[in-house]
Image (cartoon, rainbow, N blue to C red):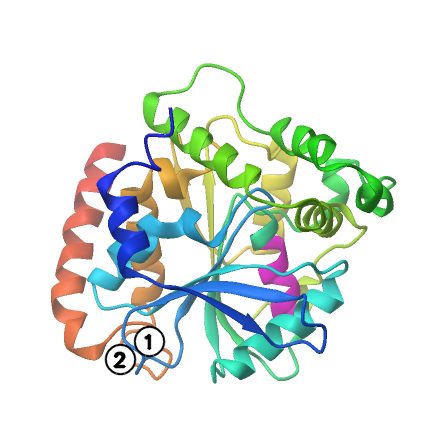
Amino acid sequence: MGEIKVSPDYNWFRSTVPLKKIIVDDDDSKIWSLYDAGPRSIRCPLIFLPPVSGTADVFFRQILALTGWGYRVIALQYPVYWDHLEFCDGFRKLLDHLQLDKVHLFGASLGGFLAQKFAEYTHKSPRVHSLILCNAFSDTSIFNQTWTANSFWLMPAFMLKKIVLGNFSSGPVDPMMANAIDFMVDRLESLGQSELASRLTLNCQNSYVEPHKIRDIPVTIMDVFDQSALSTEAKEEMYKLYPNARRAHLKTGGNFPYLCRSAEVNLYVQIHLLQFHGTKYAAIDPSMVSAEELEVQKGNLSLSQEEQ
């Protein structure tokens, strides 16, 4: 149990990348926690937004791999926000604080929904240059919880955890997926009642993405073919919403492919970011580009051979 937590990779990550705490709101209790790794000279980094059960370190495998290739990567953990507008306003202030005009966003599940809402919120003065949406959704009504969204704040932590755990895979899974689930359960345990209640509220509060406001943003939709918390209808809806999006399909990976299928996820992220190399919105150090592109071509080749 807890194999990821005691792995050399995770311990190396925790000992080399500092966790920063930043307050950007008038309310001192709203604290953003983040890992910021890679070259500071990059002004358009890739930012990771976690799911309901996640903390910033659930993306440690992406941080280690991508910074090794010269990318600047930031992984976040949200403060307690109770509605989407409040979240978007807080996130905008955070980007201002970090002096980042535009960013690429990778959002997992709730993180993916919030990434779309933020792109929509800032569409008149764009702050999002591209989106990678992993197991994401575009309409909270798919969870059939909109009627309870306003009562999560009343529920004790153990009840909230039970609701979240209900979406985790319960059937047979391979060892890497089992380790990923164990790690996410451990992360879930570290969240307090208000953190969980606010995230579930954001996840289920009646809201949907308005695609016409973000149709010019390059999008990659990343999803899995095996069991995840997302229904087939929710996935189809995403494809309809973004007809020009690139699609990154993983045969397996469950709810947390960034943990248990990290090599594939990292490669798809690199392929997505390749289109911005050589522009001012590149997330990579220019001196690292040629070596990194070569590696992506090799990875892409082996990926297509596997699919055949």
* Residue at the spot 56% in from the left edge and 39% down from the top edge: 188
Using the image, determine if residue 144 lies above or below residue 76: above
From the image, tell me which residue sits under label 2: 278
Tally of marks: 2
* Residue at the spot 80% in from the left edge and 38% down from the top edge: 155
Name the residue type under label 1: Ala
Locate residue 66: give its quadrant. bottom left
Tell me whether the residue at label 1 lies in contact with that at label 2, contact meaning CB atoms closer than 8 angstroms. yes
| Residue 146 in sight | no
* Residue at the spot 88% in from the left edge and 40% down from the top edge: 147
Range of residues picked out in magenta: 112-120
Percent x, y of residue 203 = 70, 47
Using the image, determine if residue 184 lies above or below residue 104: above
| Residue 75 in sight | yes
From the image, tell me which residue sits under label 1: 282
Residue 243 falls inside the magenta stretch: no
Name the element at disc 1: loop
Q: Quadrant of the C terminus?
A: top left
Left or right of 253 in this view: 39: left
Residue 119 falls inside the magenta stretch: yes
